[in-house]
Amino acid sequence: MKTKYLKINADDNVAVAIVPLSKGETILVDGRQITLNEPIPAGHKFALKDFAPGENIVKYGYPIGHARTACKAGDWMNEENIQTNLSGLLDYTYRPTSVTLDIPRSNLTFKGYRRKNGDVGIRNEIWIIPTVGCVNGIIGQLAEGLRRETGGKGVDDIRAYPHNYGCSQLGDDHENTRKILRDMVLHPNAGGVLVVGLGCENNQPDQFKEFLGEYDQSRVRFMVTQKVSDEYEEGMKLLRELYEQACEDQREEVPVGELRVGLKCGGSDGFSGITANPLLGRFSDFLIAQGGTSVLTEVPEMFGAETILMNRCHNEELFHQTVKLINDFKEYFLSHGEPVGENPSPGNKAGGISTLEDKALGCTQKCGKSYVEGVLPYGERLKVKGLNLLSAPGNDLVASTALAACGCHIVLFTTGRGTPFGTFVPTLKVSTNSTLAANKPGWIDFNAGVILEDEPMDKTCERFTDYIIEVASGQPVNNEKKGYKEIAIFKTGVTL
């Protein structure tokens, strides 16, 4: 390791400790000696100058808040002495920036499943999806029954996806449930889907069937449990038929430009915006240059960095859609009496993230430098290739489910603290630091911490790209190996 600290941008007035630094230690930054006034944990910031109360703290080249009180050069700068600059709704002006990606086209391919409608999946799984939470027990027994009969062979997985909704919901909540379930049923990672209903729920199975639009009726089957005498036997009969069809599917070479990835972070730390998130940004730009698609979500974690995304919108219509994306979420917070700038979790703060701006400026690096080509409401499916912004909260499972539902084949998930969960598509964990990767090999799939250990970003990105192609071609990631697969649907209103 060449240095103990990192000043990320030339305009920054704080630096980040790469290793724990001791009180009294002298650090040379830009030719100036800084004596540390207190211990600085790894991933945390220290002041490069004296700050007056109210003066902006600059990291990544942008303000991440202001000093609550007077601070001295060498002070530990954290949530105790930094206050967010964020407040309520803002007026925005479109100031488009020019984007040039000097990334050549490659001939890379992965082995995927070409579906009847021309779409491509990277997994060939049997899914059992309930229209309502009342049948969760039944779908769990059906999934276990088919796994027991088949030994799980012939397909990539057999999985039930319980949820709590589908009845006693009104308005947007009801529509959110229907949209996410529709998106799952139509997702190309499923080789066969059994939709299981009760019969008296708000999310009526017949109406839901119409809501699906055009679909492959040989691969999507329905069962309404109130209308059959033995729901287990009837369900197993339908599953056996779906299973036999799915077992015949074969992988074939597919251009990498048909890959769609979701970009997500959780349990972030002070290294997230230095290692793992920039790595995802590099990969996102590469994939888009090949004709592929990436999707950024977690709208509340864009607050403080939203103008960067707005000015990369490819046209003014997309700019206005992005303004609505941001302000709708701010209004959601304010309507519940909650401030818009209190996002960082205890784990974020312990890892070195002090304000929402600090988090957002690191978070948005996951989408690289490409133009924004699409903006999606929650629950909608992808329509255009390239970089898309998706409306969803920061909650890990809700946001990851939304990314998968919009059509992403994989969720690329960066973390500095670690998390085991996965959603209904492969959820590939990228650690921001090598300590986490070493301590949690059953959670972490790829270690971006080597970037702090002097591996060139180009080399890391090359290895990362090769690994993603292996995953897209069938190599399971840790959440798949362990069977950690769940869904969560966004709920904002009343329950009857």
Image (tube, grey):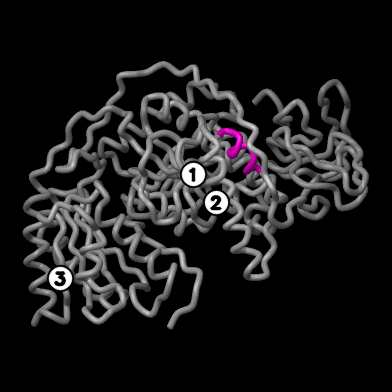
Please tell me whether mark 3 or mark 2 is closer to you in this view: 2
- What's the CA distance linking mark 3 and mark 1? 35 Å
Q: Name the residue rendered at 32%, 75% in the picture.
A: 133
Question: Which is nearer the N-term, disc 3 or disc 1?
Answer: 3
In front of the other: 8 or 254: 254
Name which quarter of the figure residue 310 lies in: top right
- Disc 3 marks a residue whose amino acid type is Met
The residue at which mark 1 appears reads as 389
Q: Is residue 138 above or below residue 237?
A: below
Q: Amino acid type of disc 2?
A: Leu
Which of the numbered marks, if any, corresponds to residue 223?
3
Q: Residue at x 85, y 31 (%)?
A: 26
List x then y, in percent, for residue 84. Answer: 76, 52
- State left or right for residue 471 relative to residue 171: left
Q: Is residue 4 visible?
A: no
- Marks 3 and 2 sit apart, C-alpha to C-alpha, by 37 Å
User: Percent from the top left, x then y, of residue 320?
Assistant: 56, 44
Which residues are drawn in magenta? 305-312
Q: Report the side of 4 relative to 434 (left or right).
A: right
Classify residue 235 as left or right of residue 4. left
Residue linked to disc 2 = 325
**Quadrant hosting residue 61:** top right
Q: Secondary structure at mark 1?
A: strand
Callout in the foreground (2, 1): 2
Which amino acid is tagged 1? Leu
SS class, disc 3: strand
